Image (cartoon, rainbow, N blue to C red):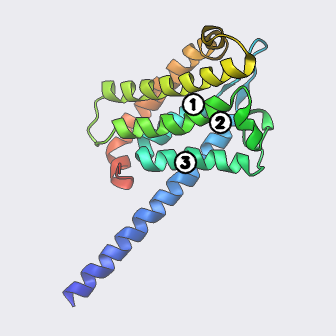
Amino acid sequence: MAKTNIQVLRREYILDKTTCGILGVISFIALTVAGAYIRFPLPFTPVPITLQTFFVLLAGAILGRRLGLLSQAGYLMVGIFGVPVFTGGLYGFARLFGPTGGYLLGFVLAAYLIGRILNDEHASYFKIVLAMLAGLVVLFTIGTIQLAVIMHVSFWKAAALGVLPFIPGDIIKLFAAATIYQGIQKQARQLYPNS
């Protein structure tokens, strides 16, 4: 009898954990989509200002490396299969090969890296900021490389177009995301164990 109760509890725990994971991934796909529609185009670069990086930082921190990666890969898949979720309403597989495609791919790796670094529920604010900064560096590096290749310019010229204008805004987003995560990190690790 006791063994049966333990088996039922384990089954319920696994189902709850799976449900939380699915809901978390879907939520961050939706938030990343919403972030794409909060955009401010700049006249001198094909890369617009959006809220997407804010949600990428939070996805990696809150969901952890595996689910954070899945949320951003899920966002890409939604766009690849024809739903207009990418910045500016453009979509489809070809979008990944455009000037901003590297940034989109960077979302996936950034979320994974942040989740990998923040692997416990007692990360200091300093560690959270460093993890998110590392994620942004990866995101911007991949984005800049592709931007340079597509536009046939040097890496440094691409960085001037696709990184420098965004530094002030992304610093604000980073500290906002770090502050939010610090306040909920214990609950986040309980809901989404970082595996």
Q: Which amino acid does label 3 sit on?
A: Ser
Q: Earlier in the sequence, mark 1 or mark 2?
A: 2
Q: Name the residue under label 3.
A: 71
Q: What residue type is labelled 1?
A: Thr
Left or right, 142 with reference to 95? left
Q: Which residue is drawn at 42% across and 44% down?
A: 65
- Residue position marked by numbered label 2 in the rendering: 35
Instruction: Looking at this view, name the residue that lies furthest to the left.
Output: 2
Q: Specify the quadrant of the image occupied by residue 54.
A: top right
Residue ID at (49%, 41%)? 59
Residue 48, x across and y down, in percent: 71, 23
When the figure is inspected, residue 17 is found, relative to residue 27, above or below; the finding is below
Mark 1, Cα crowd under 10 Å, few <14 / some 14-19 / many 20+, is: many
Q: Is residue 168 above or below residue 1?
A: above
Tell whether label 2 touches label 3 (CB within 8 Å): no
Front-most of residues 122 and 81: 81
Dot label at residue 190:
none
Task: Locate the N terminus and report the quarter of the image it occupies.
Answer: bottom left
Q: Do the residues labelled 1 and 2 touch (CB within 8 Å)?
A: yes
Residue at 35%, 48% in the rendered image: 194
What secondary structure is marked by label 3? helix
How far apart marks 3 and 2 lie (CA) works out to 14 Å
Q: Mark 1 points at which residue?
A: 53
Q: Which of marks 3 and 2 is nearer the N terminus?
A: 2
Residue 115 screen position, x and y as percent: 40, 40
- Separation of residues labelled 1 and 3 (CA atoms): 13 Å
Q: What element carries label 2?
A: helix
Give the SS element for disc 1. helix
